Amino acid sequence: MQSSGYRADFSPASLCEIDRFFDDQSKEGAAKRGGLLAADLGSRIFALGCYVCEVLRRDRNGEWLADDADEQGEVNLEVYLPDGTRCWPVQRVIKRLKNGQEDSIAAWGISLGLRFSSVPILQPRGSFSKLFGR
């Protein structure tokens, strides 16, 4: 991520960078041709999910849970939070790819109680930006 110009410092605010990455590298539920997700999509989605998992674990004092007997173990990687919340970051990253901004990783992090010390102001994209001339 960092070598491609995205801030990846494991802070909650870096989840905004994951959203920016998906905005830049995917369109309509698929990897952009020639983009960073165009090759090795499965392993890159897994890596992004693990990154999100670690951000949650660090900020909320959570615990990684995995079932080695699960054939879909990579997809079902789980984070257990001290308040009893269970979440599946890799599944969420897959949803972000498929559904776009409506499944924002940063918004999901906020809903899970991540503490954002700062959130970058994101510029509108797509038809919204055309409508308002940005």
Image: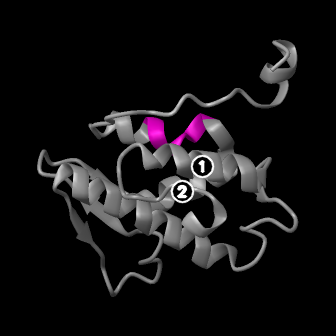
Please name whichever residue, 80 or 134, is drawn nearer the observer in this view of the structure.
Answer: 134
- Secondary structure state at the residue bearing disc 2: helix
- Which residue occupies 13% across, 45% down? 83
- Magenta residue span: 102-107
How far apart are labels 1 and 2 at the CA level?
Answer: 5 Å
Specify the amino acid type for callout 1.
Answer: Arg
Vertical side of 119 occupied by 71: above or below? below
Vertical side of 44 occupied by 60: above or below? above
Relative image position of residue 61 (x, y in whole percent): 16, 55
- Which residue occupies 38% across, 33% down? 118
Q: In the displayed orientation, state which residue is furthest to the bottom.
A: 69
Relative image position of residue 66 (x, y in whole percent): 30, 76
Q: Quadrant of the C terminus?
A: top right
Quadrant location of residue 34? bottom right
| Label 2: how many Cα within 10 Å (few below 14, some 14–19, many 20+) | many
Q: Are marks 1 and 2 in contact (CB under 8 Å)?
A: yes
The residue labelled by disc 1 is: 96
Q: Is residue 61 left or right of residue 27?
A: left
Please name whichever residue, 72 or 32, is drawn nearer the observer in this view of the structure.
Answer: 32
The residue labelled by disc 2 is: 93
Relative image position of residue 44 (x, y in whole percent): 60, 73
